Image (cartoon, rainbow, N blue to C red):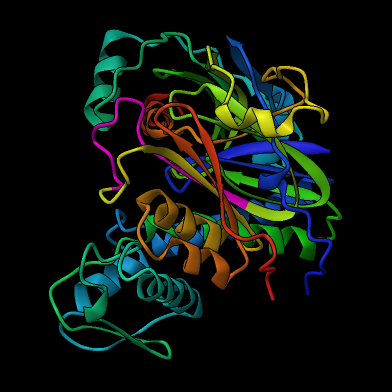
């Protein structure tokens, strides 16, 4: 087993697999997502779409349409608890691959693109012949072919639990250690961290934010993809959320 | 299709008790391995001894906005049949929690060929009281208090920033441009 790490998507991405060739393919997949969907890069496809979609319809690549479509799916199901448009998801119109904004807004896919990139890297690893592998993008991860040991830590980096991830995805949304400057504006007061396990990392990524928000739609969202969650409270308490009987279809 | 025997890792947690702070150390690649990954076509990596003078340090600052502290950076020229393919530069960045050694490949026209992390050190831990829900697991097998070591190398839950690394790469691009071609 070889493990390598490279900086992508604003974090450290780590890939473990049997061969350097497979790992190269995994990082290449991550790089493609990074280049297309980075909102901070003025020449990315996403930035281009953000500039044009308020004025006229924009034809997206398949990749961008997939991720924006999934972001919209979770925005609708969570009633805006997950929202890549910071409050304007209803004004985002995606029909097929054609995107149009009906209000001034800019999509930021950083809350879901990392998970998507992990999924794409896993597909690339399998395609390159890897029989087991793990892709970890700063805590959003997916493993296959083995039981991968994973430590869940609090935002202050104290370990609270260990799990074995097997053919599944895991993502965590955490309050920053000082509790301020938090990107999760809707985060429930008594939750410091929420981890979600399901099949695809793109869903785990979005769901971790929804569970951390603690709204009334949490259970319905988890059930939609047969996900389970673990919430770490301010007092250090751990609460499992979700119904394991509702397995992913 | 998922069968009914689906394994849910989050429902089979091993809780963790008092854990001391410790440094998670990961060594991914040797310098030699990173050189070969960055320039697969090279047949030789020639060490390039460089001692940066004040003017070069100032030029790096002007180009990248970052201060190059190491006056004698570790640089190799990747060569194939005597022809230069580019530079490999090994550098270190220090963050609030982390300490990263990395290698950057720079093409002759000043573009990043690739970045590989050589090693990563990060502090984890602190005192954790026994979780309240531990009681429901009593009588079942509990893992001993775990340590963040080689056994558990994958971590979810703390923010990992690589801004220092991104700044470092920008600084090394500037460094590559002031090194004699």
The residue range painted magenta reads: A170-184
- Judge left or right: residue B153 versus residue A73: right
Residue B98 location in percent, x, y? 48, 20
- Judge left or right: residue B174 versus residue B120: left
Taking the magenta stretch, the answer to whether it contains residue A239 is: no
Residue B62 location in percent, x, y? 21, 27
- Judge left or right: residue B163 versus residue B81: left
The rendered magenta stretch, by its main secondary structure, is classed as loop
> Does residue B119 sit above or below A126 in this rendering?
above
Residue A155 sits in quarter: top left
What's the residue at 56%, 68% (across, down)? A223
> Does residue A88 sit above or below A169 in this rendering?
below
Taking the magenta stretch, the answer to whether it contains residue A172 is: yes
Front residue of this view, candidates A241 and A194 = A241
Front residue of this view, candidates A159 and A189 = A189
Residue B170 sits in quarter: top left
What's the residue at 31%, 56% (across, down)? A41
What's the residue at 72%, 23% (across, down)? B30
Number of marks in picture: 0
Quarter placement of the N terminus of chain B: bottom right
Res. B67 in view? yes
Residue A218 location in percent, x, y? 44, 61
- Residue at the left extreme, as displayed: A104
What's the residue at 53%, 12% (across, down)? B127
Residue B72 location in percent, x, y? 47, 9
Residue A95 sits in quarter: bottom left
> Does residue B162 sit above or below A129 in this rendering?
above
Res. B85 in view? no
């Amino acid at each position: 087993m070889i493990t390598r790490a490279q900086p992508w998507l604003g974090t450290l991405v780590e890939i473990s697999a049997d061969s350097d060739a497979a790992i190269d393919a995994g990082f290449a997949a991550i790089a493609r997502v990074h280049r297309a969907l980075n909102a901070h890069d003025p020449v990315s496809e996403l930035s281009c779409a953000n500039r044009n979609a308020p004025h006229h319809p924009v034809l997206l690549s398949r990749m961008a349409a997939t991720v924006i479509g999934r972001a919209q799916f979770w925005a609708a199901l969570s009633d805006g608890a997950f929202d890549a448009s910071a409050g304007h998801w209803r004004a985002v119109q995606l029909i097929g691959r054609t995107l149009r904004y009906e209000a001034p807004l800019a999509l930021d896919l950083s809350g879901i693109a990392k998970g998507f990139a992990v999924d794409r890297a896993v597909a690339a690893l399998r395609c390159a012949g890897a029989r087991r592998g793990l892709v970890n993008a700063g805590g959003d991860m997916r493993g296959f072919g083995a039981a991968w040991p994973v430590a869940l830590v609090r935002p202050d980096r104290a370990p609270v639990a260990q799990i074995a991830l097997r053919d599944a995805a895991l993502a965590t949304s955490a309050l920053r250690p000082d509790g301020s400057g938090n990107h999760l504006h809707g985060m429930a007061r008594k939750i410091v961290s929420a981890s979600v396990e399901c099949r695809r990392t793109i869903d785990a990524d979005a769901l971790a934010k929804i569970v951390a928000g603690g709204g009334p739609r949490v259970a319905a969202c988890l059930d939609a993809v047969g996900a389970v969650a673990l919430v770490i409270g301010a007092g250090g308490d751990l609460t499992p959320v979700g119904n394991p009987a509702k397995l992913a279809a | 299709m998922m069968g009914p025997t689906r394994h849910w890792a989050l429902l089979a947690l091993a809780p963790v008790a008092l854990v001391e702070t410790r440094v998670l150390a990961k060594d991914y690649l040797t310098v030699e391995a990173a050189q070969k990954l960055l320039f697969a076509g090279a047949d030789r990596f020639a060490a390039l001894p460089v001692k940066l003078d004040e003017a070069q340090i100032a030029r790096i600052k002007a180009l990248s906005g970052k201060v190059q502290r190491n006056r004698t950076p570790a640089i190799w020229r990747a060569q194939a049949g005597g022809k230069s393919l580019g530079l490999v530069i090994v550098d270190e960045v220090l963050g609030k929690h982390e300490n990263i050694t990395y290698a950057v490949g720079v093409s002759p026209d000043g573009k990043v060929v690739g970045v590989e992390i050589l090693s990563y050190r990060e502090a984890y831990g602190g005192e954790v009281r026994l979780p309240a829900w531990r009681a429901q697991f009593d009588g079942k097998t509990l893992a001993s208090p775990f340590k963040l070591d080689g056994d558990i190398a994958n971590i979810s839950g703390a923010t990992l920033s690589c801004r220092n690394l991104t700044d470092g790469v920008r600084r090394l691009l500037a460094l590559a441009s002031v090194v004699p071609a």
